[in-house]
Amino acid sequence: MAESREVTQPMHTESDGHDHGTTVTADNERRIRWVFIFTAGYAAVQAVGGWLSGSLALIADSGHMVSDAAALLLALIAYRVARRPVDGKRTYGFHRVRVLAALANGATLLLLVAWITWEAINRINQPVEVLAGPMLIVAVVGLLVNLAGAWILMRGTKGDSNLRGAFLHVVGDLLGSVGAIAAAIGIMLTGWTMLDPILSVLVALLVVRSAWTLVSESVRVLLQAVPRGLDARQAEVELAGLPEIAEAGHFHAWTLTDDTVVATLHVTPAQGTDPLTLPGLVANWLKERYAIDHVTVQVDRPGELRAADAI
């Protein structure tokens, strides 16, 4: 008789059974909350400083920080939602909300880059006066604020895409502050106000790669694509090569959240193999070979997989 069994990995306890939820750390949430306070507070200061000095670099970076403050607030909301327990309708819990938040973070970064580039082109065509002294003071304060925020987030739990999205936003702010400082010093030394929009574009371009990576990885998770480094067909071939297994097929794997991979597959036992031993054997092999956390194995009668493939 065909047997179907879900294997519980060592990360579970006897009391939590088959709970597929992952841990939302209070430490990560606390770190993002502090960075949100820093970012939102300084965005207002920077906006006023950019308006008074006439600096596009500061105004662009202020817009960046406003966008980041909104993204950080979204990340905090995502943590709260993700903490909700699983229920009968959402058996995997609400952790995909963090992936949605990471996608929103990356998308807002890309939109911000487009806005900065557009404003810079306008400034190049129609140069405006820039007060380099106030611009430099505000930019230096911003650099210190962003360095503090980056340090706080770097010490958080690794592997959390929501936290990483927040960190990338802060890095973008930090680069914006560096660009504003460079532009202010250059304008003070040369009087060439064109440095302001030029450096704004350069800073924006530095953000594109990180933002695109965050967006593309989030989309991969939401589309339930096979995790990077895992070839489904190759995994089937390798499993079929184990002495206890005659056939392996219908292998599917996807990323549930940032650090949790789920897989399902069918196998048939080799002659003389107890079918009940296969789920544990397969799960342990996939855990060691591909770091897959949750595996559901269906054991079919000999020949059933070939018959299904032939249909």
Image (spheres, rainbow, N blue to C red):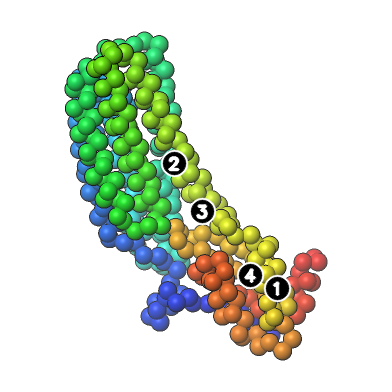
Residue named by callout 1: 240
Q: CA distance from mark 3 to mark 1?
A: 27 Å
Residue under circle 2? 210
Q: Quadrant of residue 156?
A: bottom left
| Rendered-image quadrant of the C terminus | bottom right
Q: Residue beneath label 4, please?
A: 265
Label 2 element class: helix
**Residue 18 image offset from top left, x and y in percent:** 46, 75
- Along the line of sight, which residue is nearer the eye, 61 or 202? 202
Q: CA distance from mark 4 to mark 1?
A: 12 Å
The disc, 3 or 1, on the residue closer to the chain's N-terminal end is: 3
What is the spatial separation of the Cα atoms under label 4 and label 3, in whole angstroms?
19 Å
Q: Are marks 2 and 1 in contact (CB under 8 Å)?
A: no
In this figure, which residue is indicated by the disc labeled 3? 221
Relative image position of residue 282 (x, y in whole percent): 60, 76
Which of disc 3 and disc 4 is earlier in sequence? 3
Q: Earlier in the sequence, mark 4 or mark 1?
A: 1
Q: State if disc 1 and disc 4 touch (CB < 8 Å).
A: no
> Closer to the camera: disc 3 or disc 1?
1
CA–CA distance in space, label 2 to label 3: 17 Å
Q: Secondary structure at mark 3?
A: helix
- Are dots 2 and 3 in contact, CB under 8 Å? no
**Would you say 121 lies left or right of 128 here?**
right
Mark 4 lies on a secondary structure that is strand
- Indicate the amino acid at tag 2: Ser
Q: Looking at this view, is 55 or 90 the one in front? A: 55
